[in-house]
Image (cartoon, rainbow, N blue to C red):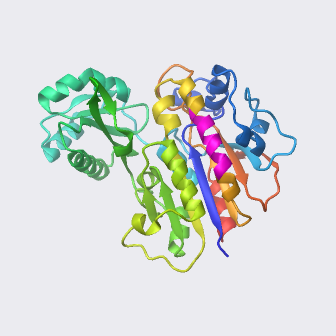
Amino acid sequence: MKKRAIIVVIDSMGIGAMPDCEEFGDIKECNTLKNVCEFNGGLNLPNLEKMGLGNIQDFKGIKKNDKPTSQYGTLREKSKGKDTTTGHWEIAGLVSEKPFATFPNGFPKELIDQFVEATNCGGVLANIPASGTAIIEKLNDEHHETRCPIVYTSADSVFQIALDTDLIPLDTLYDWCKIARRILDEGNYNVARVIARPYKVIDGKPTRISKDRRDYSMAPPKPTVLDKVKNAGAKVIGIGKIEDIFSKAGITHAIHTGSNKEGLELTIKALNGTLDLEQIKYPDVEISDDEREVIFTNLVDTDMLFGHRNNAKGYGEAIEEIDRYLSKILPLIGKDDLLVITADHGCDPTVPGTDHTREQVPVLYYSPSIEPKDLGVEIGFDSIAKRISDWLF
């Protein structure tokens, strides 16, 4: 019997401030989905509505459903953070008691000096918290004059390196990111992610190339439910930046994506058996005859393209696009499959600032073999890991 768990993370689609949001620099009014719905005069989400999303809260345009098809509820994070790594790790069962380090004044001189020496890059530009799109526009000319990479951070625990790949090769950017990851780990800086931010100048405008972005995460300090599945000889297929978030731990197959559309289409292929698994399998992984499987998809456009850029209109359109794809995904979910739709944090495009917001998230569980019900408020994204473990084992 083939049992599958399919996790779809709509990146940053939070549904309301956590009680401790102010400790993370956020206001109580942050509610990514609710505020995006209000901004757009309501969203057209017939599939999510049918599943019961509108039963969780009052979201403009998403009606309540007397006969929802799914179990639905709200999850409150246990971990101390509001970033991608923390959220995904907790979804997979790993609670982070200690928050990752942030650098509101830029990275310390000794760290930057080590990076410059180890990479021989000649120096760095910026070294401040910044919006990625704004900083490459501001420093592109200087980057071309000096050939120095643009290094910046944000309110999250990230060491980001941007450069024009028409000036410096993409492989060099990836090498520099790996060096930064090593230096950060050896120095115990407790930085969640090093992010490669390649861009090109297109029609005179510096433009980030999403498909070539790579995240170099700190390795999870403990095993997750993904490791449990992998160690059983079963498949764990990461779609999008999943393999980066888990630093490949607990993953057997992985494929990156350049857009939500690509991620959704690859998820459909994984579900209907047309995804070429041999091509994306890690070479050192042994797969047994075990028919259990996890498909783990991250849909990042909501966060990266719209949340951080305060684009509430684009954010709403991205959710509507996901809903349209659910028309193709839901019929592929059999009685031995469990579909989980959730988020990892918030990034409310309607409130001041461009950073993530500390929010609770929705969770929807769908399978033809489970009884729909209201799950209320559950403490811990890790309840998803327990549910998946119970489902598969």
User: Magenta part mainly helix, strand or loop?
Assistant: helix
Toward which corner of the image does residue 344 lie, by quadrant? Answer: top right
Instruction: Confirm whether the magenta stretch covers residue 222.
Output: no
Expressed as whole percent of the image width and height from the top left, the position of residue 15 reads 66, 34
Question: Which quadrant: the N terminus?
Answer: bottom right
Q: Could one spot residue 191 in this view of the protein? A: no
**Nearer-the-camera pick, 306 or 146:** 306
Expressed as whole percent of the image width and height from the top left, the position of residue 320 reads 62, 35
Taking 21 as reference, is 215 left or right? Answer: left
What residue is at 23 percent from the left and 25 percent from the top?
140
The structure residue drawn at horizontal position 66% and vertical position 26%, both measured from the top left corner, is 37
Please identify the residue farthest to the right as the structure is shown: 66
Depth check: give the residue in front, 301 or 57: 301
> Does 158 sit left or right of 142 as displayed?
right
The quadrant of the picture occupied by the C terminus is: bottom right
Q: Who's the residue at 62% across and 53% down the image?
A: 382
Numbered-mark total: 0
Left or right: 383 with respect to 247?
right
Q: 214 or 17: which is nearer to us? A: 214
Q: Magenta segment, which residues?
A: 318-328
Would you identify the image quadrant in which residue 348 lies? top right
Give how far across and how far down residue 357 sits, in percent.
54, 31
Q: Is residue 97 left or right of residue 19?
A: left
User: Can see residue 294?
Assistant: yes
In magenta segment, residue 326: yes
Percent of width and height locating residue 201: 26, 29
Q: Vertical placement of 76 versus 231: above or below?
A: above
